[in-house]
Image: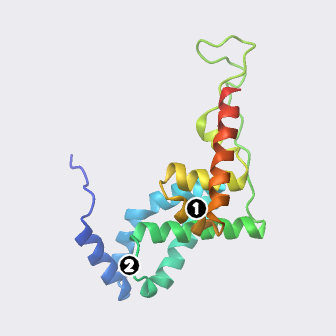
Amino acid sequence: MTVESQPSADEQNEWLARARLGDTRAFERIYREHSGKVYGLCLRLTRDPATAEDCTQETFISAWRNLPGFEGRSALGTWLHRIAVNAALARSRKGSLEIVPQPAGEDEDTPYEGQAADETPPMDLEAAVGSLPEGARHVLVLYGIYGYTHEEAAGMLGIAVGTCKAQLHRARRLLRERLDA
């Protein structure tokens, strides 16, 4: 059994240079390397697997079209994340972002281990993040989960840095309330 290693920076730069010249196989390598992370970001922003898939596809179509203009001032992954955030926000603005409720579990009435029958089950962290208002959720995902600075997250979202900080504070407060309930 072989473990696939992460490509080196030189390999990624080679793929990028070849893709910029129109090499679709090199772009496919970039896609394979980054699509999982882009999809994860889109899923956290949209909370819907089908919409996240669409946003991921839109991200890579846009990246392919705009690759000649990519100047390399940021990492390729950061650039792709910026495109993904824009794709998710564009869907949200159009009103085409439809949140599909998760199907109810078959064992919904069965108490968790160590839980009395009349207690409410604890809220899972992913569900708590998903239940946040859109602005707070977006900031929490970009700043708290993906590690962008307030300046970077604010730039991606098109908001002021102060608004970004306020939304993060709001997200943390709401998460505490939801998880303590």
Where on the picture, by quarter, is residue 15? bottom left
Scheme of image coloration: rainbow
SS of the residue at dot 2?
A: loop
Real-space CA distance between mark 1 and mark 2, rounded to the nearest whole angstrom:
26 Å
26 up-or-down from 147: above or below? below
Nearest to the observer: residue 161 or residue 58: 161
Q: Is residue 157 visible?
A: yes
**Which label was assigned to residue 53?**
1
Which of the 4 image quadrants contains residue 51? bottom right
Height in image: 55 above or below 27?
above
Q: Amino acid at mark 1?
A: Glu
- From the viewer's perspective, is the residue at label 1 or at label 2 nearer? 2
Residue under label 2, please give it: 72
Residue 47 at least partly seen:
no
Residue at (54, 71) in percent of width and height: 83
At x 21%, y 46%, the residue is: 1
Q: Residue 9: horizontal and vertical position, in percent?
A: 26, 68
Q: Secondary structure at mark 1?
A: helix
Residue sitting nearer the eye, 31 or 68: 68
Q: Judge left or right: residue 148 versus residue 116.
A: left
**Residue 115 lies in what quarter of the image?**
top right
